[in-house]
Each structure stands twice: as C-alpha cells, then as structure tokens.
C-alpha cells in the first residue's frame, strides 16, 4: 500500500510548514488527487488518520479533491476525456495519448492554527 508513504509525505510537508510559520497545529490539509495517479483516496485517508497521531496535524482534516483524467492526442490534436476505463491510445488514429490532467498529486493548501498574541491582549 504505497498510500502510507504518500500520507507520510503529506504530513511532513504540513508539519514543516506549520513549524516555519510558528503554528501550533494543522487544522486541515487540502490535496488534489488525479484519477490517473494510482492513489486510492480511501486508502490515503486511512493511512493519514493512522499516521497523524502525535504530529502537529493530529486533529487535521484531509480534504481530497479529485481530478478527472484528460488526455490529448499529439498526432490529430484532439483532446480525449476517457470515461471509466483509462484510454492510453487515441480512438481516432491509435497513437499514444498524452495525459494532460489526472496525474496530479499535489498539496493544494494547508490550514494552520497560529497563536495570535494580539488576540489575548485585546480581550
Ligand atoms: Zn489521434
């Protein structure tokens, strides 16, 4: 299950960012996962929940944004949106398709909880 390694990587990015900005915890992490990235979102959520304990992201939500696969044929310059089964060959000329979207695995945003000194002073 390679999702474990990916979840660990996401946690590392979030913790590094939290420390860099002096945040006391990570409230949420939003990631973008393409349908062509070979990542099972449910498995990734499971791995994330298992690994987050004891980190700055122990209470963090993991939000997963799915990106559908899109491909383009460089030979006949047409874009193909494969549905269901993933097409790797152009339905018109049989040439290899270039995947233009759907291979993403990106951390989009990290919600940090930063202690604000000014808050307690104005209370
Ligand atoms: Zn083609």
Image: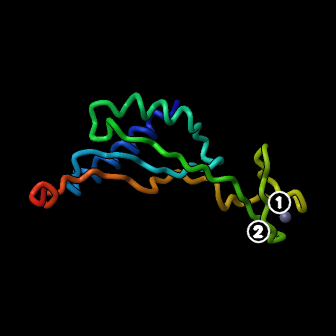
77, above or below 86, in the image: below
Image point (49%, 53%), residue name:
106
Q: How is the image coloured?
A: rainbow
User: Are dots 2 and 1 in contact, CB under 8 Å?
Assistant: yes
Q: Is residue 66 left or right of residue 86?
A: left
Looking at the rendered structure, the secondary structure element under dot 2 is loop
Image point (49%, 35%), residue name:
45
Q: Nearer the viewer, residue 15 or 114?
A: 114
Looking at the rendered structure, the secondary structure element under dot 1 is loop
Q: Is residue 10 left or right of residue 102?
A: left
Image point (44%, 36%), residue name:
5
Q: Is residue 11 left or right of residue 30?
A: left
State which quadrant residue 7 falls in. Answer: top left
Q: Is residue 35 left or right of residue 13?
A: right
Residue highlighted by disc 1: 95
Percent from the top left, x then y, of residue 68? 68, 53
User: Disc number at residue 74?
Assistant: 2
Percent from the top left, x then y, of residue 16? 28, 50
Quarter in which the C terminus is drawn? bottom left
* Mark 2 beta carbon near ligand 1 (under 8 Å): yes
Percent from the top left, x then y, of residue 80? 79, 60
Of the residues under marks 2 and 1, which one precedes in the sequence? 2
* Mark 1 beta carbon near ligand 1 (under 8 Å): yes
């Amino acid at each position: 299950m390679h999702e474990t390694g990916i979840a660990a990587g996401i946690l590392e990015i979030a913790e590094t960012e939290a420390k860099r900005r002096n945040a006391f915890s990570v409230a949420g992490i939003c990631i973008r996962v393409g349908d062509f990235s070979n990542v099972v979102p449910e498995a990734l959520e499971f791995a994330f929940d298992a690994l987050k304990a004891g980190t700055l992201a122990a209470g963090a939500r993991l939000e997963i944004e799915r990106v559908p696969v899109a491909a383009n044929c460089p030979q006949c310059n047409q874009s193909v949106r494969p549905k269901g089964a993933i097409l790797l060959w152009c339905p018109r000329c049989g040439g290899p398709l270039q995947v233009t979207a759907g291979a993403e695995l990106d951390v989009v945003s990290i919600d940090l909880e930063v202690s604000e000194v000014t808050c307690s002073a104005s209370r």
